Amino acid sequence: MFSNKENFKQAFLQKLEMMCGKSFGESTKRDQFSTLGNMVREYISTEWINTNECYRTSKGKQVYYFSIEFLLGRLLYHNLLNLGIEDVVKDGLKDLGIDLCALEEIESDAGLGNGGLGRLAACFMDSLASLNLPGHGCGIRYKHGLFEQKIVDGYQVELPEQWLRHGHVWEVRREDLAVKVPFWGSVDCKEENGELLFRHIDAETITAVPYDMPIVGYKTETVNTLRLWNAEPSAYPVHKDILKYKRDTELVSEFLYPDDTHDEGKILRLKQQYFLVSASLQSIILSYKKQHQCLHAFHEHISIHINDTHPVLAIPELMRILLDEEGMGWDEAWHITVNTISYTNHTTLSEALEKWPVRIFQPLLPRIYMIVDEINERFCQHLWEKYPGEWKRIESMAIIAQDQVKMAHLALVGSYSVNGVAALHTDILKKREMNSFYQIFPGKFNNKTNGITHRRWLLKANPLLASLISEGIGDDWIWEPNKLIQLRKYEEDRSFLQQLFQVKQQNKTRLASRIKEKTGLVVDTASIFDIHVKRLHAYKRQLLNILHVMYLYNRLKEDSSFQMHPRTFIFGAKASPGYYYAKKIIKLINTVADKVNEDVMTKEKLKVVFLENYRVSSAEEVFPAADISEQISTASKEASGTGNMKFMMNGALTVGTLDGANVEMMEKVGSDHLFIFGLTAEKVMEYEQQGGYHSLDYYHHDKRIRQVVDQLINGFFSDVDGEFEPIVDSLLMENDQYFVLRDFDSYVNIQKQAERTYENQDQWLKMSLRNIAASGYFSSDRTIREYAEDIWKIKSI
Ligand code: 26V
């Protein structure tokens, strides 16, 4: 049906009538979208079945990627592209008077993630399938993904996100594969033939129903599975408040949690984590047992990867299955478990490391708690033998201490591999944050620098650039992104560089019209598009950026001879609903925007745009349109970053600190091809440990700083009295934890340098080209190959 345009058109019209019960003439865009979606999903089915059959018979090792977040975005165009049928469909629809791009916009983003961590999981799914690797995702089918952000009067307002309102064409409900997950109750222990047997009794069970999504590899026959679990009531117990039971049950897969500390201790979040892990392990073992009699060689056939500590209960849950259900002894069960599980750490920020109070954990998961307790006892015993008498050290490394279960410690002890997500980050884990564990398990630690799928972030998001590249070097880069390096032969080719410029301008025009449509603001496409998009966190320093904007504004107002190239500063960021400080920064950005955009004296030079509800689908319009990429976290705080890579691949130049993967980007492209400023991670950590930084000194001695900080509270923004006091307090009274004022001067200078470079168009374009050429390394295909070879030991089929 997708073999040629005519067949497609005929099949489409027929399907539409059958599905919607109306004629083509009466159909809405949504009818057309569902029709196409269903046709594509059905088309995928054969290969999906074949892939599964192939995995069953080949008996090769498989990996399951456990993640509490999968930030997929839209799938229609992505699937068409990967299936290689986008042209047939586009042309066929065009004949029918339908614009494929317009249909694409009907689809809601599957926004089942907060930011980098969830998007990484989605990129990994694409790379696994595209490399024909046997790897599947396991997650939760949240009814509501990350909240929808509205900006009202400059403030963030959150609305429940509704991606399932019109159904989701890509999923298949597999009721036949439902399993039960037990909570609460108690543990019954009895002796049989001299052995202790444990049983979880009086539990309240929740039914987990899988919804499977096909993950289509790029022009291959592989279709892997992303299995998302839905929480539903089990057969209704007799003596219960049925409505309450139904509500409580469904709540487990109702919401994705926004990442903030204020939610810590929320019982529901822990329920979600066990729900994911227990349902996924049950389904893995069910299918494993169809091919194997027992689980003695489980770890040789199955690898389970845990994306951060959220799914770390996979460790005690696998132990429970092996001990209680398979009747294995502790040592064998432990051997299998440790050799099955691998773990990625995504942050060194201690406030972000998960801990659960025993008083919550133990009653909710009584048998799992017993097992964690036993793991802890044995680990502490081992520590005691190694470090006799060193109580302090042992307490600091224990899995359970001070009535808290430390999830990262459990992950470190119960897995065979622990990786960071960029070289610098892994180094910091080894040398500092997790040094005591590194000393006992040096062989477990390794680095896997993050990557992004170049298929979504270049080929799909930036078709103009993709075609220009293919005209220049052929299309091999789509399969081997390292070949992008061949673009360097155009470094001195003015006509190629001019085409690169034209592509950027067209992408800027596309974004400008989106900005006009959403905000009414007209932005100048000849201005520098300086873009800062990511979650809002103090450490990511959106504040530094906006203070710089205020500084530029002051210069323009006060000094008529001050020259600057026009710039459009574009922000996109969601703050966690409970993150008070982050929300203040959003209000500040919008307040500055209002002031600056209206000022007739400066509006030709300076514009500030806040993009509401930044998400995967808007990201796809943003990255291709950027001239400057803001990657300005306090060095040592950003584990890797992946937006940095998306900008680079789309030819933006980075203004950034030596943090996360920026360091490796610099190594690949050469230090002359990005704009690095600010403290090094080393220096930041030295200040943190030894002191020596006094933010007030910078306030007093730098009059640019004094001016902008004062303006936050001196009536400069007339109608928001007192609004920004907490920001001033953080900078002056709390000694500026993220070194914003310390890096201010260096930031102003590098921005000036970036601007001068932009004005030398040849040089800029050449640098841009060099960035694209060097970005191949940051394809998630490279990352996934490393995971497959070094950690999971899985092979392509
Ligand atoms: C969570 C929290 C919660 C409490 C407040 C502070 C805070 C800070 C960070 C986080 C995020 C934790 C995990 C995470 O999302 N890490 C991100 O993972 C990306 C993929 O590896 C990586 O590129 C980002 O640098 C990293 O922040």
Image: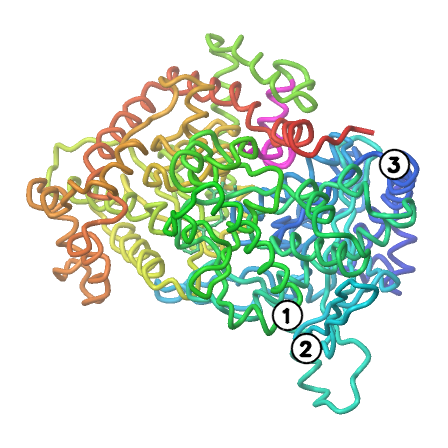
Mark 1, ligand 1, within 8 Å: the answer is no
**What type is the residue that disc 2 sits on?**
Gly
Is 454 inside the magenta-drawn segment? yes
| Mark identifier at residue 185 | 2
Residue drawn at 30 percent across, 32 percent down: 682
Q: Estimate the x, y position of residue 707 in percent, counting from the top left.
A: 12, 48
Count neighbours of disc 3 (C-alpha within 10 A) and say few if under 14, some if 14 to 19, many if 20 or more. few
Query: Which of the two labelled residues, at mark 3 and mark 1, occupies the earlier sequence position?
Result: 3
Count neighbours of disc 1 (C-alpha within 10 A) and say few if under 14, some if 14 to 19, many if 20 or more. some
Labels 3, 2: front one: 2
Decide: is 43 above or below 796: below
Instruction: Give the quadrant of the N terminus.
Output: top right
- Secondary element type, mark 1: helix
- Does the rendering let one see residue 354? yes
- Which of 161/791 is in front? 791
- Residue receiving disc 1: 366
Q: Estimate the x, y position of residue 730 in percent, counting from the top left.
A: 22, 55
Left or right placement of residue 84 versus residue 361 in this view: right
**What type is the residue that disc 1 sits on?**
Pro
Say how the picture is coloured.
rainbow
- Residue receiving disc 3: 59
Left or right placement of residue 414 versus residue 622 in this view: right
Q: Estimate the x, y position of residue 332 in percent, counting from the top left.
A: 74, 46
